[in-house]
Image (cartoon, grey):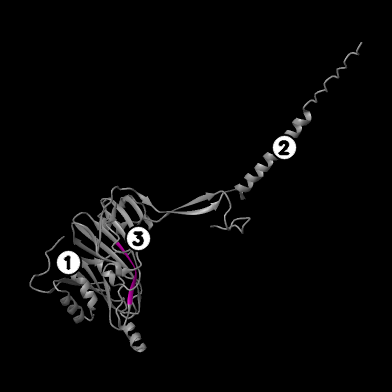
């Protein structure tokens, strides 16, 4: 029984993609530790530039991405993510405190702290496009039957597990299409490890949607980072089973005047000003994910930027101000005492009252 369990753990595919499904071969494993995506939406067309950070021992895998309409696929520019990371970096500032804390003297040593029709009604699966993009073999599929998708993947070297076929059913019911991608390292031998080349998908959409439903199959906690480019500040309609999304940056941005190198960002936005919202979300229990992220305009375009503070003890000339304050208070008290003594010494002593002797009687 123990041997059977160990073999089962080796041949079970790993799922850990926040926006699709990763399918390795039966004898290998691959997981996605983090998914970072740039989503650009102008009210009619949506673009997703996605970068996956993976680990495992699989030299190749298949990845499935559901999309609401037919998508074009091309390689993305890796520098897009570094540009946005720089633009949204936290502002660092120093914050001083008065009274000593743990680690400060005297407690311890001081330290620093365009839409194209739906799938063909007559065919359960249709390959609507196929191209080679760098290390990726990309097939764009239209399917009306998840079992047909399962067979296509199997005929192309990958087996779609039953639970993933079941998870795809809602997308088939909504007549969504898929992007199926064969992932492989550039040398064709090394395992898929680290940041993969980003992919850029473009499709028509009258709402800003980020597919997440398939990530409920993940066996490990998931982390999602979204850079949302739109006309206004955007926010998810709900948590879809994860922790509350956290906004780490919100602000209006003109790529042409942002400073620095923003060529990749200009290519995505067409150089037009946009509102950038950066969102982080964790999914500690991915099995609770119950839908796709749909984002909407927030109530106001309120800007926000993360502040990172370094707390330092307030000093003057290297001496803690609280010490100087105490010394000053002692000196003031001592001076006041001396002043009182001097005043008392200089105060004239009143003479005793005269003694009145009564006159003798008689």
Nearest to the observer: residue 175 or residue 70: 175
* Dot 2: element: helix
Say whether residue 116 is left or right of residue 3.
Answer: left
Question: Is residue 197 in view?
Answer: no
- Marking on residue 176: 1
Task: Provide the residue designation for mark 2.
Answer: 337
Nearest to the observer: residue 76 or residue 54: 54
Q: Residues within 10 Å of mark 3 (few under 14, many from 20)?
A: some
The residue segment tinted magenta is 30-37
* Separation of marks 3 and 1 at Cα, in angstroms: 26 Å
Q: In the rendered structure, which disc, 3 or 1, sits on the residue that comes first in sequence?
A: 1
Q: In the rendered structure, which disc, 2 or 1, sits on the residue that comes first in sequence?
A: 1
* Separation of marks 3 and 2 at Cα, in angstroms: 61 Å
* Dot 1: element: loop
The residue positioned 20% from the left and 54% from the top of the image is: 43
Q: Nearer the viewer, mark 2 or mark 1?
A: 2
Q: Please, what is the dominant secondary structure of the magenta stretch? A: strand
Q: In the rendered structure, which disc, 3 or 2, sits on the residue that comes first in sequence?
A: 3
Task: Provide the residue designation for mark 3.
Answer: 280
């Amino acid at each position: 029984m123990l041997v059977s369990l160990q073999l089962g753990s080796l041949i079970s595919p790993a799922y850990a993609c926040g926006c699709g499904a990763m399918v390795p071969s039966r004898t290998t494993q691959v997981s996605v530790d983090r998914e970072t995506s740039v989503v650009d939406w102008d009210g009619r067309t949506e673009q997703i530039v996605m970068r996956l950070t993976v680990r495992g021992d699989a030299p190749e895998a298949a990845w499935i991405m559901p999309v609401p309409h037919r998508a074009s696929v091309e390689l993305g520019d890796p520098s897009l993510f570094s540009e946005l990371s720089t633009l949204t970096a936290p502002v660092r500032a120093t914050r001083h405190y008065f009274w000593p804390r743990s680690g400060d003297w005297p407690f311890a040593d001081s330290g620093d702290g365009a839409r194209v029709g739906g799938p063909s009604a007559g065919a359960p699966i249709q390959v609507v496009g196929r191209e080679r993009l760098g290390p990726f073999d990309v097939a764009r599929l239209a399917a009306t039957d998840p079992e047909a998708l399962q067979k296509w993947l199997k005929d192309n070297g990958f087996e779609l597990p039953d639970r993933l076929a079941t998870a795809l059913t809602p997308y088939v019911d909504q007549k969504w299409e898929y992007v199926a991608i064969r992932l492989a390292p550039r040398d064709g031998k090394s395992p898929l490890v680290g940041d993969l080349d980003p992919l850029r998908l473009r499709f028509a959409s009258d709402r800003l949607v980020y597919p997440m439903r398939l990530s409920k199959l993940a066996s490990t906690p998931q982390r999602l980072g979204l850079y949302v480019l739109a006309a206004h500040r955007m926010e998810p309609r709900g948590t879809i089973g994860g922790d509350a999304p956290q906004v780490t940056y919100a602000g209006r941005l003109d790529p042409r005047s942002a400073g620095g190198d923003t060529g990749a960002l200009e290519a995505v936005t067409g150089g037009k000003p946009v509102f950038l919202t950066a969102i982080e979300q964790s999914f500690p229990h991915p099995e609770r994910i119950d839908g796709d992220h749909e984002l909407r305009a927030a109530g106001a375009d309120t800007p926000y930027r993360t502040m990172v503070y370094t707390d330092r003890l307030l000093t003057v000339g290297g001496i803690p101000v609280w010490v100087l304050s105490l010394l000053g208070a002692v000196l003031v008290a001592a001076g006041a005492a001396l002043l009182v003594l001097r005043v008392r010494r200089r105060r004239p002593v009143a003479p005793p009252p005269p003694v009145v002797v009564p006159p003798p009687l008689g």
